[in-house]
């Protein structure tokens, strides 16, 4: 699960790409072909990290986990 900060950054990137007008669709995850559309029909962008790294809590079990998106 992404952190609120990571979610905000991805949302800002999505909004900027959408506002540029360079794409027919900007998706938070997955490309149109994952939804059954042909890849050549749209100019699409997907905003999703390659991986999310979760920092271990160690002895501090009362604190929240820290997750970081990796591009």
Image: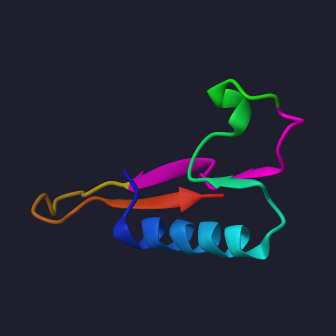
Number of disc labels = 0
Q: Residue furthest left?
A: 62
Q: List x then y, in percent, for residue 57.
A: 25, 58
Give the left or right position of residue 26, taking residue 11 as reference.
right
Give the left or right position of residue 46, taking residue 66 as reference.
right
Q: Colour scheme in the image?
A: rainbow
Pick whichever, 62 or 11, lies toward us. Answer: 11
Q: Which residues are magenta?
A: 39-54
The structure residue drawn at horizontal position 70% and vertical position 75%, both measured from the top left corner, is: 19
Pick whichever, 20 or 11, lies toward us. Answer: 20
* Residue 33 found in image quarter: top right
Pick whichever, 13 or 42, lies toward us. Answer: 42
Give the left or right position of residue 5, taking residue 71 as reference.
left
The structure residue drawn at horizontal position 84% and vertical position 50%, both measured from the top left corner, is: 43
The structure residue drawn at horizontal position 41% and vertical position 73%, both measured from the top left corner, is: 5
Where does the C terminus fall, quadrant-wise?
bottom right
- The image shows residue 45, relative to residue 13, as above or below, that is above
The structure residue drawn at horizontal position 86% and vertical position 37%, both measured from the top left corner, is: 41
Q: List x then y, in percent, for residue 11.
A: 52, 68
- The image shows residue 30, relative to residue 3, as above or below, that is above
- The image shows residue 35, relative to residue 20, as above or below, that is above
Q: List x then y, in percent, for residue 7.
A: 44, 65
Give the left or right position of residue 10, taking residue 4 as reference.
right
Q: Residue furthest top?
A: 36
- The image shows residue 16, relative to residue 37, as above or below, that is below
Residue 44 in magenta?
A: yes
């Amino acid at each position: 699960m992404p952190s609120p900060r990571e979610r905000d950054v991805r949302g800002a990137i999505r909004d900027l790409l959408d506002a540029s007008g360079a794409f027919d669709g900007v998706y938070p995850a997955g490309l149109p072909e994952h939804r059954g559309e042909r890849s050549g029909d749209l100019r699409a962008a997907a905003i999703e990290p390659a991986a999310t790294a979760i920092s271990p809590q160690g002895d501090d079990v009362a604190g929240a986990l820290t997750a970081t998106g990796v591009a």
